[in-house]
Amino acid sequence: MKGLWLENQQLHLRTDIPTPSPPSGEVCVRVLRAGICNTDLELLRGYYPYKGVLGHEFVGLVENGPEHLINKRVVGEINASCGYCRFCRTGQPTHCENRTVLGIVNRHGAFADYLTLPVTNLHPIPDSITTDAATFTEPVAAALEIQEQLSITPNERVLVVGDGKLGQLVAQTLALTGCELLVIGRHREKLALLEARGIKTGLSEAVSDRAFDIAVECTGNPEGFSLARRALRPRGTLVLKSTYAGNLTLDASSLVVDEITVMGSRCGPFPKAIELLAAGKIDVEGLIDGRYPLSEGKEAFEAAQRKGVLKILLEMS
């Protein structure tokens, strides 16, 4: 089968990858659509020493497996857990000590004709959700994870730093809570997408120091971290949604003095994301900036790395 193969920070389109044969408890999924994520770009830059097929945002068709899933469009949770470690036993499979992660850790990903995942990871997609929109299920779930970790009410002042792909989804999902929300970015055209949905936006100078209860950092760069940190009031919460390819320097003493809570946040609830997409409460298709066939995968990655580009999708034949 065809697939985009990463090795030694080099991306190759291969046509000789063996079609995966699912082990017990897993099924083979024919990929229909897959989205390029910032994590994929960071892996290309060396964020983690991964070798194999990239990609973890996808929608596909189950070709064999349980009867209720055959020929159904599905999306899949990316962490495949062991079921018996201390995290699995306590209902925390995304932190499984033995997990593989689709297209990230020891499991070939979605930028190929086929992938395999455990049946328990798969979620059928209702007909009301387009295939393009379904591709966003994983990042929408990641955005919703913040609300799994924190109780956010209309009384909170919340800052989102970053107007890229993830920042857009975090902002749209947080706006549904009714909180007093401000999104900071660098690109007027991206901020305009949020403004059209009634979300307040601005540039960095619009942020007052020590004025927010919660700050969500979605840029993955030191400048974004610094802005989010100084925006927080004492005893505020700093949510980190981005992966950082390099080291980050921070003033640890200020975190202690202000009693700041620093919280990492990544994978989230797929059922809630699907429900939100089916209800049309957020716009994801407006974030698509290009579609490429898998055979032009390297060109797709080049497009995804251009300044100002949001979501690039790969379409499988």
Image (tube, rainbow, N blue to C red):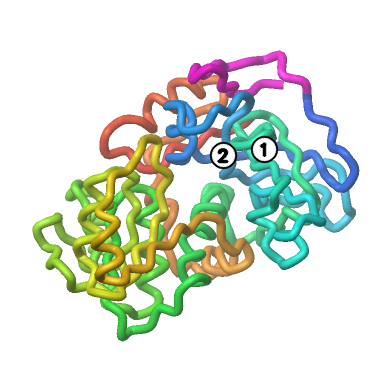
| x then y, percent, for residue 186 | 19, 48
194 relative to 82, above or below: below
| Horizontal and vertical percent position of residue 84 | 82, 56
Which of the two residues, 223 or 120, is positioned nearer the viewer here?
Answer: 223
Quarter of the image where one finds residue 316 = top right
Counting from the top left corner in percent of width and height, residue 23 is at 87, 38
What is the quadrant of residue 38 in the picture?
top left
Q: Are marks 2 and 1 in contact (CB under 8 Å)?
A: yes
Give the CA distance from mark 2 to mark 1: 7 Å
Count of labels shown? Answer: 2
Residue 294, image x, y percentages: 56, 26
Q: Which residues are magenta?
A: 1-18
Residue 34: image tag: 2
Identify the element where label 1 is drawn.
Answer: strand
Residue 271 is covered by the magenta coloring: no
Q: Residue at x 40, y 52 (%)?
A: 166
Amino acid found under the numbered disc labelled 2: Ala
Instruction: Look at label 1 and name its amino acid.
Output: Val
Label 1, residues with CA under 10 Å away: few <14, some 14-19, many ≥20: many
Q: Is residue 112 visible?
A: yes
Q: Neighbour class for label 2 at 10 Å: few (<14), some, many (≥20)?
A: many
Whether residue 117 is situated above or below residue 115 in the rendered picture: below
Dot 2 lies on which element? Answer: strand
Residue at point 72% right, 33% down? 114
**Residue at position x 27%, y 66% in the image:** 159
Residue 65 drawn above or below residue 196? above
**Residue tagged by mark 1?**
31
Assign the N terminus to one quadrant of the image.
top right
In the displayed structure image, the side of residue 206 where residue 68 appears, left or right: right
From the image, which quarter does the C terminus lie in? top right
